[in-house]
Amino acid sequence: MPQNFTFPQRDQPLLLPVDMREWLPEDDLVFIVLDAVAALDLGEFRRRYRADGHGRAAFDPEMMVVLLLYGYCQGERSSRVIERRCVRDVGYRVICGGLRPDHATIARFRTRHEKELGGLFSQVLRLLAAEGMVQLGVLSLDGTKLAGNAAQKANRTLPQIEKLLAEAAAADAAEDASGRSAGRSHVHPGSAVNAGSRCGCGY
């Protein structure tokens, strides 16, 4: 009797759900972070942009905040790696709704709003604690222990979060200085880059 295998059908067209949120389970961390940020006042972020609507449209600050906070929850500090995740990772793609901010845009947003991000990250943790999603005391986020004292002022930036943002800035600076893109380390040279060459189609 021949061996019985199930083979992947990589060339099979798929009809994905119309609503990309259905790509993830209902209790995924993406939705927790989305809901938490949506409940906060992002006026300080929005006031930094032109009110007359002129110029090139900027990415929605709420989306960018969620993108960074979710990335940091996943242990990502590099803007280049987060850029790559926006193409390859379902969670990041749902957050961005099909948009693809590049690493320079992500890094500029973090630098431009670093103070606000620090305070907001603290607020998110406390909001999750108030909703019973996490326990007060010591919160573990990707191995980084964060104090969860609800008596602290809501806008106070926890020292650990300041360290996290500093790590993100250092990661971007190191990659810029090295002259290489960590987010493109998966790209292979030559014909392997072209899908037509890989399958021998010649287009």
Image: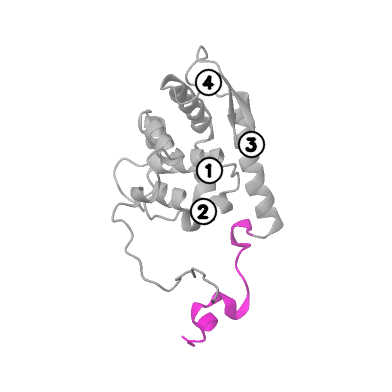
In the image, residue 138 lies in the stretch drawn in magenta: no
* Label 2 or label 1, whichever comes before in sequence order: 1
**At 44% across and 71% down in the image, what residue appears?**
9
* Label 2 or label 4, whichever comes before in sequence order: 2
User: Gap in Å between the C-alphas at discs 2 and 4?
Assistant: 30 Å
Closer-to-camera residue (26/180): 26
Q: Amino acid at mark 3?
A: Ala
The dot on residue 156 is 4
Q: Residue 165: x, y in percent?
A: 60, 36
Q: Amino acid at mark 1?
A: Gly
* Label 3 or label 1, whichever comes before in sequence order: 1
Please, is residue 103 above or below residue 161 in the view? below
**At 51% across and 48% down in the image, what residue appears?**
106
Magenta residues (range): 181-203
* Label 4 or label 3, whichever comes before in sequence order: 4
The dot on residue 41 is none
**At 34% across and 49% down in the image, what residue appears?**
22
* Label 2 or label 3, whichever comes before in sequence order: 2
The dot on residue 85 is 2
- For mark 1, what is the residue? 71
- For mark 3, what is the residue? 166
Please, is residue 118 above or below residue 17 in the view? above
* Quarter-of-image position of residue 132: top left
- Pointers 2 and 4 in contact (CB under 8 A)? no
